[in-house]
Image (cartoon, rainbow, N blue to C red):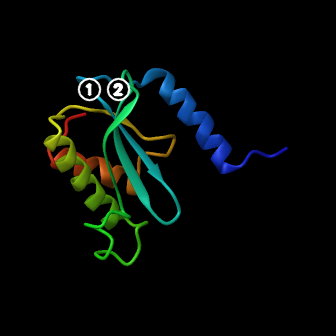
Amino acid sequence: MKKSRDDIRRRIHNRIRKKVAGSAERPRLCVFRSQSHIYAQVIDDVKGGTLCSASSLDQELKGKFKRGSNVDAAKAVGQLIASRAKDKGVTAVVFDRGGFLYHGRVKALAEAAREGGLSF
């Protein structure tokens, strides 16, 4: 039986999650991209809770872009998650690409978050 792309991505994501874990000092910046939107969360794995989140569906970004699945939207989400994390007092994170390749939208989000003040 042939594995789907999502099955392969989930396998890679599980392999990454064995090594990457967020703490109170350095929470995990997790990225998920769908066909129509991109999402980011800052997660404290010790407590098991989300500190802040941002996506291309947020009210602040919803009307700005024709589509939520392009590089410009990913940059805006990266800047938004960085500002929200800094408001919560988070400056250093561990990056979790979620099994996606580090290029395109994922890379744009990461670079925008770095420019916004997060270090990883």
Q: Mark 2 belongs to which amino acid?
A: Gly
* Residue 22, label in figure: 2
Establish if 116 lies above or below 90: below
Would residue 27 be visible to someone looking at this image?
A: yes
Q: SS class of the residue under badge 2?
A: loop
Q: Which residue is mark 1?
A: 26
Residue 17: % across, % down: 49, 27
Q: Mark 1 belongs to which amino acid?
A: Arg
**Residue at point 18%, 39% (across, down):** 88
* Residue 7, label in figure: none
Q: Quadrant of residue 42?
A: top left
Residue 87: % across, % down: 14, 43
Q: Where's the C terminus, which quadrant? A: top left
Q: SS class of the residue under badge 1?
A: loop
**Residue at point 49%, 66% (across, down):** 36
Q: Is the residue marked by circle 2 packed among few (<14), some (14-19), or many (20+) residues within 10 Å?
A: many
Looking at the rendered structure, the number of numbered marks drawn on it comes to 2
Q: Is residue 11 left or right of residue 103?
A: right
**Residue at point 21%, 42% (across, down):** 85
Establish if 40 lies above or below 77: above
Report if the CB atoms under discs 2 and 1 are less than 8 Å apart.
Answer: yes
Q: Where's the N terminus, which quadrant? A: top right
**Residue at point 37%, 78% (across, down):** 66
- Compare residues 88 and 16 and report the one nearer the observer: 88
Q: Is residue 16 left or right of residue 2?
A: left
